[in-house]
């Protein structure tokens, strides 16, 4: 009979550590588990900080507690005389993994950052030797007892993937709002699925078969979401060479389909044989061929492709094979396929421009990038955080504070919190740049996008509205704040039918939708 070797005094903490290893760090369960493990030492995280070290204010304390429990559990494991219980061993393994990851968090981050500075992560990872030695301390080979599910090199590669995922999710998805955190949680699932235990057991080398489809309006950061996923794929580690089998920095290939001509599009994707068309002077590999086993190709604006190209891409997704132009040989596609679109997909399919069978091959993993107006509607204070991030990027750390204050005040005064931001994050960045250079920002389609109160203020200065239009806009402006015809009529001392007439007149002049 197997022995229960874990002391009852630490079992609860070790079970919580086992669960924290498998949870999504961007969901509330993560904080609840931290509270359970740390008790009175738990501190609320600083949700306003984008610094990786501030993601959780409990990382330092968690490290201390985890190291203590892992060492105590190791002593108990060594002292066990019989065959240890397998469930106990799995809990022990998870707790040790958390302790090891915590110990090597900073070396992994340093490796990632230096790779970006050098433009390549294809270099010796020397701290693996220390990691392997620590791994051996906790997992000695004992006949008749459970053995670790994976060798040290695989665990090391898994830790590297998790660290890259944290880094890229924070680097590419900005903001502190609930909406931003929900998007981070969704991206984490696109990398590891919702079941981290299953991913670690068997899915780590199968996620390349899952197509990720990213949708959202133009300027909402679809390619950044794709980069966070594509640059965080699992890459095996060669412990003899002390090298990862692929440089993650070269593993992501974005292709903007709308920027390519029809002939060039096929050649870029599939490659071609010499003489297959005019100008094909030599054989050429396409992106599908150069995308390695652990690489990712993103086809942006996928709805811009012709139906016959969609058929070819559908065949690639179904068979994982393709042909160069002018060639009959079948070549394997081994990478991960991602697509993005800002179109209304239902409308594109109804109109016959986008094949339904192709769509249903794309939607196994769908991520929706949010429009900026939706984020600000949920959390207006997010505007300041986003402007602060942009200001730091374009003006540097020393000027970020003053530019943030200047741009935030200008936006609130002149555009208002109800501005629709049709260009999304891309427009917000250009707005901050304009405020830095000119002290103002002049958006296109001003009358359609500005809140009515701002439109009326502008009209008073330039006199560009008729009296009838001005009256209708004023009544509609009051209605926007009440969303009730009766209350608007009471405030303006008008008949309810008169209010409704002028609101409909205002909405008919600019296409705004009524909800009253």
Image (cartoon, rainbow, N blue to C red):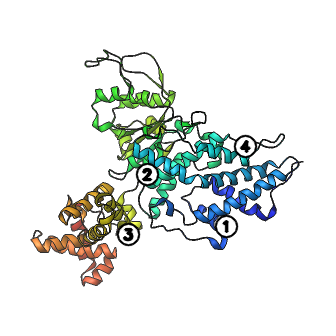
Q: Position of residue 265 (x, y in %)?
A: 32, 30
Q: Nearer the viewer, residue 476 or 490?
A: 476
Q: Position of residue 474 (x, y in %)?
A: 21, 75
Earlier in the chain: of badge 3 and badge 2, it is: 2
Q: Position of residue 89 (x, y in %)?
A: 77, 50
Label 3, label 4: how many angstroms apart (C-alpha)? Answer: 48 Å
The answer to whether residue 16 is seen in the rendering is no
Label 3, label 2: how many angstroms apart (C-alpha)? Answer: 20 Å
Label 1, label 3: how many angstroms apart (C-alpha)? Answer: 32 Å
Is the C-beta separation of discs 1 and 2 under 8 Å? no
Q: Residues within 10 Å of mark 4 (few under 14, many from 20)?
A: some
Q: Quadrant of the C terminus?
A: bottom left
Name the residue carrying label 3.
380
Quarter occupied by residue 513? bottom left
Name the residue carrying label 4.
148
Observer-side mark, 3 or 2, equals 3
Name the residue carrying label 2.
368
Earlier in the chain: of badge 1 and badge 2, it is: 1
Label 2, label 4: how many angstroms apart (C-alpha)? Answer: 38 Å
Observer-side mark, 3 or 4, equals 4
Label 4, label 1: how many angstroms apart (C-alpha)? Answer: 26 Å
């Amino acid at each position: 009979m197997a022995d229960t070797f874990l002391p009852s005094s630490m079992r609860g903490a070790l079970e919580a550590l086992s669960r924290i290893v498998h949870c999504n760090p961007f969901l509330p369960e993560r904080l609840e588990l931290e509270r359970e493990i740390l008790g009175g030492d738990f501190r609320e995280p600083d949700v306003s900080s984008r610094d990786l070290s501030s993601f959780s204010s409990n990382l330092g304390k968690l490290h201390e507690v985890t190291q203590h429990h892992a060492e105590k559990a190791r002593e108990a494991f060594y002292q066990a005389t019989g065959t240890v219980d397998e469930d106990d061993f799995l809990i022990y393994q998870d707790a040790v993994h958390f302790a090891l990851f915590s110990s090597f968090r900073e070396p992994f981050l340093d490796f990632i950052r230096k790779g970006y500075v050098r433009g390549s992560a294809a270099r010796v990872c020397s701290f693996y030797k220390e990691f392997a030695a620590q791994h051996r301390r906790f997992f000695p080979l004992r006949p008749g007892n459970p053995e670790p599910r994976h060798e040290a090199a695989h665990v090391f590669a898994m830790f590297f993937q998790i660290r890259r995922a944290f880094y890229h999710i924070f680097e590419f998805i900005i903001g502190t709002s609930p909406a931003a955190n929900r998007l981070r949680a969704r991206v984490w699932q696109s990398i590891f699925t919702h079941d981290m235990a299953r991913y670690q057991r068997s899915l780590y080398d199968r996620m390349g078969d899952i197509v990720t489809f990213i949708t959202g309006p133009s300027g909402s950061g679809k390619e950044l979401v794709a980069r966070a996923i594509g640059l965080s794929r699992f890459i095996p580690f060669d412990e003899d060479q002390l090298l990862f089998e692929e440089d993650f920095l070269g593993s992501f290939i974005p292709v903007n389909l709308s920027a390519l001509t029809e002939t060039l599009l096929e050649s870029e994707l599939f490659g071609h044989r010499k003489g297959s068309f005019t100008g094909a002077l030599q054989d050429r590999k396409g992106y599908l061929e150069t995308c390695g086993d652990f690489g990712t190709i993103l086809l942006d604006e996928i709805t811009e492709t012709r139906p016959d190209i969609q058929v070819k891409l559908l065949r690639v997704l179904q068979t994982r094979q393709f042909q160069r132009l002018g060639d009959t040989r079948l070549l394997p596609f081994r990478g991960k396929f991602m697509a993005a679109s800002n179109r209304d997909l239902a409308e594109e399919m109804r109109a016959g421009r986008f094949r339904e069978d192709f769509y249903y091959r794309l939607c196994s993993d769908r991520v929706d990038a949010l429009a900026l107006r939706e984020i600000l509607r949920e959390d207006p204070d997010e505007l300041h955080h986003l402007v602060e991030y942009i200001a730091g990027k374009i003006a540097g750390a020393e000027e970020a504070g003053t530019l943030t204050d200047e741009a935030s005040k200008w936006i609130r005064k002149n555009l208002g919190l109800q501005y629709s931001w049709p260009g999304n994050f891309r427009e917000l960045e250009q707005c901050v740049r304009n405020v830095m250079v000119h002290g103002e920002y002049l958006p296109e389609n001003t009358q359609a996008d500005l809140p009515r109160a701002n439109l009326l203020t502008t009209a008073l200065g330039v006199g560009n509205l008729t009296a009838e239009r001005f009256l209708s806009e004023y009544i509609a402006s009051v209605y926007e704040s009440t969303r009730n015809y009766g209350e608007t009529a009471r405030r303006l001392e008008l008949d309810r039918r008169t209010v409704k007439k002028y609101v409909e007149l205002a909405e008919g002049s600019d296409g705004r939708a009524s909800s009253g």
